[in-house]
Amino acid sequence: MKISAFHLMPHRELPADFEQKYESVWVTPPWWELADAGRVGQYYNWTLDELIYAARAGFDGVCTNEHHQNAYGFMPSPNLMGSVLARATAGTNVAVVQMGATLPTSNPPLRVAEEYAMLDCISGGRLVAGLPLGSPMDVNLCYGITPLEHRERYREAFALTLKAWQAREIFAWNGRYFQLANVNLWPRPVQQPHPPVWVPGSGSISTFDFAVEHDVCYCFLSYSGARSAKTMMDGYWKVVADKGRDPNPYRAGFLQLVAVAESDARAEEKFARHVEYFYHKCLHVPSVWFAPPGNQDYRSLVATLNNPVRRAVDPKTLRYRDFVDRGYVIAGSPATVRDRLKEDVVKGLRVGNLMVLLQIGSMPHELALENIDLFAREVLPDLRGCWDDEGWVNHWWPESLRARPGAPRAAVPAGAGRP
Amino acid sequence: MTRETTHTVWQGQVRIPVVSQGTGPALVYFHGPWGLTWSPFLDELARDFTVYAPRHPGTSPDAPEDVYHLDGLWDLVLCYDELLTALGLSEVVLVGHSFGGMVACELAAAYPARVRRQALLAPLGFWRDTDPVVNWMLLDPQALRARMFRDPDGEAARAMFGAPPPGESEGGVAPFGRPGESEGGVTPFGRPGESEGGAAAVAARVAQTWAMGVTGKFIWPIPDKGLRRRVHRVTAPTLLLWGKDDRVVPPVYADEFTRRIPGARLQVVDGAGHAPHLEQPQAVARTVRDFLAARA
């Protein structure tokens, strides 16, 4: 299987009373009170160094993502980060997994097609093209896209992007949201017919259908662990079966928070406050903002209101041990982490493309590097062989990298990240 | 007794159910963002008028997706012109609430010859940076209820939102959510798992949420879609009614209308928030009837 290091680029030093004092970590947190550009520059560089370090340590891919107006994770342009990573991992077998640039907010969305093609050229065909719908906070609240038009706009942009990468002739696009009289993309991606496409989602039946119909890798970006995701992913696999696709585990991606230490007890000592910071502060968002009316299509709205999931838990009432017990975070010794990842995530959800978040909330740079290092040395090698016995092909990974495990350590230029 | 008939416009693609009652001159009532509920206010108007209350495209449960055939506000206005023709009405008086008030005023600007008089209840349509219209689509149910109504526990609030929930406060509590999770785990209203009151209550929540989403199409993210460039075309004598305690669209917005529509008159309604016709149905209906019945 393929294992990638994911990063949010969070604010690492929010005040202790942040969630009492402010309405939300997203959309409305006041920059002038909470942040400093010089310090934020340090965060960006730490983030890049941590991902480059992960690439060097043996991960198969490095992931960035797009969010706006928040302290939870603020890479408004993931492709700026991705281009640094593409260059810094030149000559390796590490994939640049953009999770990614948000189509509905890119106008015209050709910009995403172009930048991804650039990244694929710069990286020599190592791009994984994540094409997310974008969160309602980013797309509807920050970028002003009408909730009812969010999905339609996405579907049109998705179709345009795929066509722009592949068309042999110049074409006109006379769409509902985008009109372009001469589409002639420069550059085109190295990977043919186009880079592998991943579509992140969160359990909407509409997105299941979309992902399966378009034969892309569906990625569940979850902060509540495998157990909470089980029903959802079972639903996804049912759609895969119903639509006659094979149960190739590489059709599924999953994001898991992971914290590894010498022992379970040491993991708690080292990581407890960072995990709590993440769940208490970084996810501090009014719940209605996750679903402004119209954002869910009618079918999903009816399904949601008729089959409400069991009463959700307010994460602010939970502590480190609760997060671990509930599987939101997989934390502990390398053996603990290995077992839980294999059983709960990889086998439990049938996941072939695993993403792990190893820099969590306030976790400082040095500690993030320790977490990455221990995971790469003690956990990752054991996971890599999962699914090999079933003989599936990972069609959703750059072809030239499919057979090859991540970076040979020496291949990453010295000075990138800290050893 | 109300009757409901569905009219199809827009090349057969958009079905608009119209609830009607009464006899007399034609009055068209455009509902607000929360869907159409026949109310005592409309009963009162139906004493002097034939009230036609169309459901905005997409807001009826049997045709939720018809709205996708419309690109924007201009299409919606054209649809209503087609609807008036389908109803056989060449000339009407208009009443509209909130979003429906904006629709009425757009129609009066686009087709001045069709609109004899109009009464607008806390209409949308303008924007002031100093007094922003509150985005009700981003409020949790209690906050919405409290903002909408002068008396959040009163009869009008109950008619729209059901009985007030038990003591537990949700304000400021962020139930567990994950980015991108608009799609399944989190319900727009209240917390997942909280639906009470059975199938009818769920259906009502679906209808109300979807009505907000559908009408939101025409006003997101700022409910100023250029009425200020068109409103000079309005020739219909105009009455504005505003709840004194409107905390969704502050009463200062009345100035935007009275400044731009010559002779427009403002009536401030005591004891009412953003739905004056629901909180003070008798008084508001009397004022509206008197105004609409007057000779121009």
Image (tube, coloured by chain):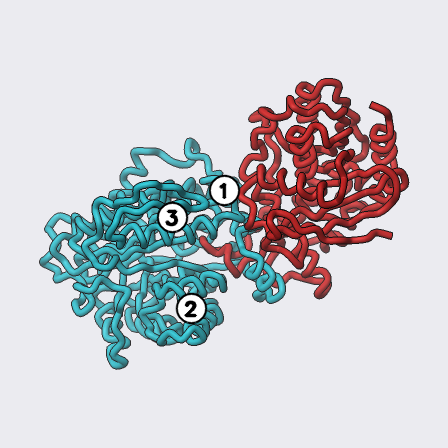
Binning the other alpha carbons within 10 Å of mark 2 as few (below 14), some (14 to 19) or many (20 upward) gives many
Q: In the image, is A37 to the left or to the right of A296?
A: left
Q: Residue at x 50, y 48 (%)?
A: A149
Q: What residue sits right under mark 1 in the picture? A: A141
Q: Distance between the residues labelled 1 and 2?
A: 29 Å
A350 or A170, nearer to the observer: A170
Which chain shows up in cyan?
A
Question: Label 1 sits on what residue type?
Answer: Leu
| Nearer the observer, B113 or A251 | B113
Q: Which amino acid does label 3 sit on?
A: Leu
Circle 2 chain: A
Q: Earlier in the sequence, mark 3 or mark 2?
A: 3
Please check whether the numbered discs 1 and 2 fall on a single chain: yes
SS assignment at label 1: helix
Q: Nearer the viewer, residue A182 or B272?
A: A182
For the colour red, the matching chain is B
Asked if labels 3 and 2 share a chain, the reply is yes
Instruction: Tell me where residue B57 appears, x and y as whole percent.
Output: 64, 48
Query: Where, by quadrant of the figure, is residue B270 drawn?
Result: top right
Which residue position holds label 2?
A: A226
Residue A103 disc label: 3
- Residue A310, percent from left and from top: 58, 66
Point 28% across, 65% down: residue: A396
| Residue at the (18%, 50%) spot, across then down | A121
